[in-house]
Image: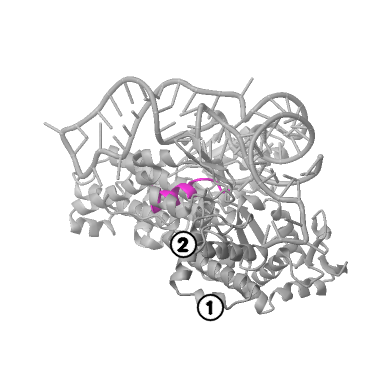
Amino acid sequence: MEPVATEQGILPDDALRTFAQALRESAAALYDDARLEVAFEAPRRPEFGEFATNAAFSLARVARASPQDVAQRLTSDLAERAPRVAALFASIEPVGGFVNLRLAPQIWQAAIACVVRDGENFARASHRGERVSLEFGSANPTGPLLVVQGRALSIGDTLARTMRLRGYDVFVEWIVNDAGGQLETLGRSLDARYRQLIDPAHPFPEDGYPGAYLVEIARHLRDDGADEDVDAMTPEQRIDFMARFAADAIVAEQRRCADRFGVEYDLWQSERELHERGRIQAGVERLTELGLTYEADGAIFFRATQFGDDKDRVLVRADGRPTYFCTDVAYHYEKLRRADRVIDVLGPDHHGYIGRLAGLAAALGYPGRLEVLIAQQVTLVRGGEHVAMSKRAGHIVTLDEILDEVGLDATRFFFAMLATDSPLTFDLKLAVDESNDNPVYYVQYGHARICSVLRKADASDVEQARYAELRSLDHPAELALARRLCELPHLAQSVVDQLAPHRLARYARDVATDFHQFYTECRILAEEPELRRARLALCLAAQRVLSVVLGLLGVTAPESM
RNA sequence: GCGGUCGUAGCUCAAUUGGAUAGAGCAACAGGCUACGAACUUGUAGGUUGGGGGUUCGAGUCCCUCCGACCGCACCA
């Protein structure tokens, strides 16, 4: 068993792979050709080492021995059989059935040299040809973006950025729900606001959208000189015109807000356009080809009960109008055909929809290809008091207002910090009052502090640090920081695999903590040249990692603050 | 009533998907600048993971059952 060495030396992953192989060989030799699965995990407690494997537990049953004994025998056999592998580790300790590992400092030194060399490309994976369709945001075009959409935007965009880093082809889309009954309601609402400009007593529809933004839009419409056009229309034409005008204006606002939030979409898909192009029909036709539809009472039904739903669902009504579910069928059919992995980030009122969409994917022949992520509810409080957020009552808090109050960096970081399926209470007053203690500033401060050190250092020193000998890095704080920085590739991949963007925010904080600690315990500029350059290299690596992670979160990495 | 999500320190949240003595931040208390940014850092205190059963070497995590919060349950979107 010979370790693989790169230009920089042996890297942590190589060392672990080599160790796993050696451990399997020991298991086979000791326990009658037993096959051993070796996986590594990061122990929760630092005294348990940098990596641990629980391989001995699974072997214990076969071996008819206690996990403790198995771990003990495996490690002592490995030390004899593969001394060169053992030499890659500062310690290999069997404890309570686990095998706890600590890598030799030179492994971490090689890893840091790699991070410095890779720079902004650290943790970037090569293109793998897997296509991902990601939909998030997708608010109805009946009002401005609200707080909960901000959460979806944070989660979705961070996922998209991380997937791109990891070599996936990501296609980000927003579906504009501009068809169906709600548009008619929107049209009547705007029409009423428009008429109220002349006659303030004109009644507002009881089911209308009460927000003040429609008054604004009505004014724009009037300022555009629409009076004559509008007056010449039939009532139906007039409502339809109002609906389109309002929806276009609102969608434009939503796009501006998403842009302000730092999110770029590849496609804003109008549902009305899908209808007009006859693309809605394709989904129904596909299901019919598969024998999964039937007619009853003049309507076309989808056999949803065959896929776990509690009742069959109507696709096309007796009068020929498709249902909302029907457009979902068509839209998801398109996405499922053009992507290997389809992800929807939906709002908290769509829980009941998860099963139905999963069933739909299975029916269309793509079981398990569609994943639904629920961005859980956001409850706003201000100084401990509930902020009412009923659309009906017109008490809305828009995403723009949050951004005005808290700022983009803090908002994005805060929303990304929480697990997606965890409900969140957001205290606006707290976010403002404690802005100095906000985690995002802590991380940004870490980045600015590093930049400050690099500015104060000799330019030639910094240059030489890029190729420096890092043998002198062995202080516990240095090694802890190095370990942390090396987690990024694995962590970014776990974000993609498990759709867990919040780990990036926590990781950013951990990196900042480890840097601050290193900075507190180790002097940099006043040291002898070799150590000074080695520590500058560590600074460079930490700065790159922070900048990459903040970039994934859509948060700026300031050089000073 | 049926189904879904959730319940973890006083507060806001983690826990790498079944691993070891459940961790961070805020708030509280006690320390650290004549050093490259103190927006930093060291320590103390804080827990029957809503309750109760079960599965196994091992459960915050999986299963059952209560309790509680929120959300769905349309030929609305």
Q: Residues within 10 Å of mark 1 (few under 14, many from 20)?
A: few
Q: Is residue A517 left or right of residue A350?
A: left
| Residue A229 tag number | 1
Asked if the magenta segment contains residue A517, the reply would be no
Residue A71: image location, x then y, percent: 60, 37
Q: Is residue A292 visible?
A: no
* Mark closer to the chain start, 2 or 1: 2
Q: Nearer the viewer, mark 2 or mark 1?
A: 1
Secondary structure under the numbered disc 2 in the rendered image: helix
| Pick the front one: A211 or A558 | A211
- Percent across and percent down for residue A343 are 61, 61
Mark 1: which amino acid? Asp
Q: Nearer the viewer, residue A213 or A229?
A: A229
Q: Is residue A142 above or below residue A36?
A: below
Prevailing secondary structure of the magenta residues: helix
Please report, as a chain letter, where disc 1 is located.
A
User: The disc labelled 2 sits on which kind of residue?
Assistant: Glu
Query: Where's residue A496, x and y in %?
Result: 55, 57
Residue at x-position 61% and y-position 33%: A68
**In magenta segment, residue A412:** yes
Residue that appears at 45% across and 73% down? A224
> Which residue carries the number 2 mark?
A216
**Above/below status of A553 relative to A317:** above
Work out how far the residue at label 2 is from the one at label 1, CA to CA, in angstroms.
19 Å
Residue B67 falls left or right of residue A71: right
Magenta stretch bounds: A406-420
Residue with the most extreme right position: A296
Q: Is residue B68 above or below residue A340?
A: above
Residue A274 percent coordinates (x, y): 65, 74
The dot on residue A111 is none
